[in-house]
Image: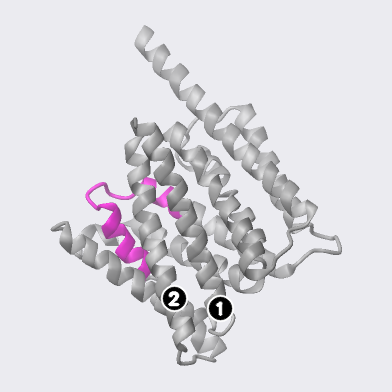
Amino acid sequence: MDGNLRGAILMVLAMAGFAFEDMFVKSAARHLPVGEILILFGLGGMLCFMVLTKRRGEPLYHPAVLSRPLLIKAAMEVMGRLGYTVALALTPLSNASAILQATPLVVVAGAAVIFREPVGWRRWAAIALGFAGVLIILRPGLEGFELASLWAVVGMLGFAGRDLATRAAPPVLSNVQLGIYGFLMLIPTGVILLMFTGGAVMPAPREALDLLAAVGFGVGAYYGLTAAMRMGEVGVITPFRYTRLVFALILGVVVFAERPDALTLIGAAVIIGSGIYTLIRGRQVARAAARARGAV
């Protein structure tokens, strides 16, 4: 198999892993407060990435973690994890996952504004259409509007900010080192949240297994995602990220007896279509620019 095919397969497997992570987090949230989930999930993920870092012979601490981009990344990681975890606890898995698919669109828009990356009117139109898909799912002002769904929007914006900050992160840090601090930030966030909400309980064996499985699937999916992006062309591999929604819809129906309505499915299709077009168009623009530079 060539790099693109192997990368695509790995990307699909990684997205399945993330969907299972979401499923186990949502299952645990039926009995555990969100703050406690963040603490335990953050602790488990941090320990896993610490082991991976030591196995690679890399230091657990590097002064670069105190650089401005990484501090911003840590804040955005907290915003993303907090918002998305609350959304998983309060809203259907399929809805939260569908809104999350708009993250790449926000990243493209943010890169244009922050890093001055060129984005033509076609991609801006696709980004606007993708945001319209989010509104279709949220349906503000209509009977089916759920205020709790806005937490998924908060999570999506946080993850997009994290990805943008990662672009500016010092290259001296590896992905597994960055994983340590991303999960570490969840622990104080969960503590602060519990200080306001209270309600911490001793996890029963079922909830403990849910969280253990969530960490395992999350770390494995993160590793698969990283390997996939290094294996083939980014423009070919990245669209397969949207398979996460397919897995989330299946798990939502099978495990939680969810029944996504027509507006949710239409909104999800609009977001995915806009995202794939944005990726393809960006690849075309990059190739045209490369040919122009080669002709000079």
Q: First in sequence: mark 1 or mark 2?
A: 1
Q: Which quadrant of the structure image shows residue 59?
A: bottom left
| Picture coordinates of residue 33, whole percent (x, y) | 54, 83
| Picture coordinates of residue 30, whole percent (x, y) | 59, 80
Evaluate whether residue 188 shows in this view.
Answer: no
At horizontal 28% and vertical 49% (from top left) the residue drawn is: 170
- Taking the magenta stretch, the answer to whether it contains residue 168 is yes
Give the total number of marks visible in the rendering. Answer: 2
At horizontal 56% and vertical 41% (from top left) the residue drawn is: 109
| Picture coordinates of residue 48, whole percent (x, y) | 29, 68
Residue bearing mark 2: 211
Residue bearing mark 1: 29
Magenta span dominant secondary structure = helix
Q: Amino acid at mark 2?
A: Leu
| Picture coordinates of residue 134, whole percent (x, y) | 69, 51
Compare residues 58 and 196 and report the one nearer the observer: 58
Magenta region: which residues? Answer: 162-184
198 to the left or right of 228: right
At horizontal 28% and vertical 57% (from top left) the residue drawn is: 176
209 to the left or right of 83: left
* Position of 293 relative to 80 (above/below): above
Secondary structure beneath disc 2?
Answer: helix
Q: Amino acid at mark 1?
A: Ala
At horizontal 50% and vertical 86% (from top left) the residue drawn is: 194
* Position of 230 relative to 58 (above/below): above
Q: Which quadrant of the structure image shows residue 8?
A: top left
Compare residues 103 and 226 and report the one nearer the observer: 226
* Position of 87 relative to 177 (above/below): below
182 to the left or right of 246: left
Secondary structure beneath disc 1?
Answer: loop
Colour convention of the picture: one colour
